[in-house]
Image: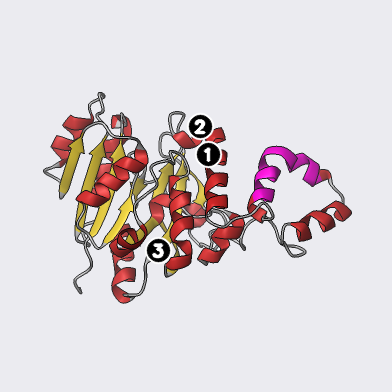
Amino acid sequence: MPALPLVSVVVPTLNSAQFLRQTLDSLACQPEVPLEVVVVDGGSADGTVPILRAAEDQLPLRWVSEPDRGQADAINKGFAMASGGVLCWLNADDTLLPGALAKVAAQFDRDPSLDMLSGLGILADPVGNFVRVIPETPIQVMDDLYRFGCHICQPSTFLRRRVIERHGPLDTSYHYALDFENWLRIGRHVTYRFVPEIFSTFRLHPASKTVALQERFWSEEWRAFRTHGGTWRSPFLLAHLHNTRLRWALYLAAAPLRAVLWPLFGLRRGEWLAPGPPPVLAHQAKTPTPR
């Protein structure tokens, strides 16, 4: 096997001990790739530190436990501590599927020009049961990011270190849409590839920001979208209005109304609110629950 690049996985965490052990176990199931795990704990008081000390015997692990200024600050701190040529972050309630990093590292090894790679993820319930594959309509090219929004699975996304060095770390003014802002900021400057394989599990539970604070994502997503070149005349805005205000109105609307709205937002006849059909995965309906 050729020497694969070192992959550094940064795990930001704060009082997530109930899930952290599973996250670290999933990283221990990546034996085929040179791996570095960097855990940045914001000073948890729930038993996180004993879990990290125990994991030192199983993983090439570096960790720190101290107050920080939020998730983006913790990830940036982890990137600064990391030494790998390929970087990603994995939140403490998410996991990687066995062998995922070997596939990712092989993609980067085969193509030195590749800057950013993204795959699919499993959306899971609080106990880890399979819900569906996400994103349902992943972007194939980064230009679609500026039309349709963040159809990228964050825990299944990987960057060359040079991307962070050239374009800077995460913007710490964002607490909810920090990944989306980062993709938009680098999107027009990177060589990107979508890989139709499942790399991670994204867990939804009552304490997660995606569930508990969903209404706060919209203002940050819109701020990032406008900051980096998006306009109100976009399917991204139409999709938001559809999901939050107009779902039933559009469902009941006749063809003339759609004929007016679709051209206004740059959509072709028959085109929907997301970039293209989802990839066909023969095993998708039979995907086992990750453990």
Residue 181 position within the rendered picture, expressed as x and y whole percent measured from the top left: 47, 50
Whether residue 227 appears in magenta in the rendering, the answer is no
Residue 193 in view here: no
Read off the residue under disc 1: 217
Residue 62 as seen in the image, left or right of residue 235? left
Q: How is the image coloured?
A: secondary structure
SS category of the residue bearing label 1: helix
SS category of the residue bearing label 2: loop
Prevalent SS, magenta region: helix
Q: Earlier in the sequence, mark 2 or mark 3?
A: 3
Extreme residue toward the left, this view: 57
Q: Which residue is rendered at x = 50% and y = 32% of the image?
A: 213
User: What are the residue bounds of the magenta stretch?
Assistant: 237-251
Out of 269 and 187, give the one closest to the viewer.
Answer: 187
> 10 Å neighbourhood of mark 2: few (<14), some, or many (≥20)?
few
Q: Which residue is rendered at x = 46% and y = 57% of the image?
A: 185
Q: Which residue is rendered at x = 21% and y = 53% of the image?
A: 82
> 10 Å neighbourhood of mark 3: few (<14), some, or many (≥20)?
some
Residue 28 as seen in the image, left or right of residue 158? left
Read off the residue under disc 2: 213
Q: Are marks 2 and 1 in contact (CB under 8 Å)?
A: yes
Residue 43 as seen in the image, left or right of residue 207? left
Q: Which residue is rendered at x = 36% and y = 59% of the image?
A: 158
Q: Is residue 10 above or below residue 117?
A: above
Q: Label 3 sits on what residue type?
A: Leu
Q: Earlier in the sequence, mark 1 or mark 3?
A: 3
Q: Place residue 246 in its image quadrant.
A: top right
Read off the residue under disc 3: 117
Q: Quadrant of the N terminus?
A: bottom left
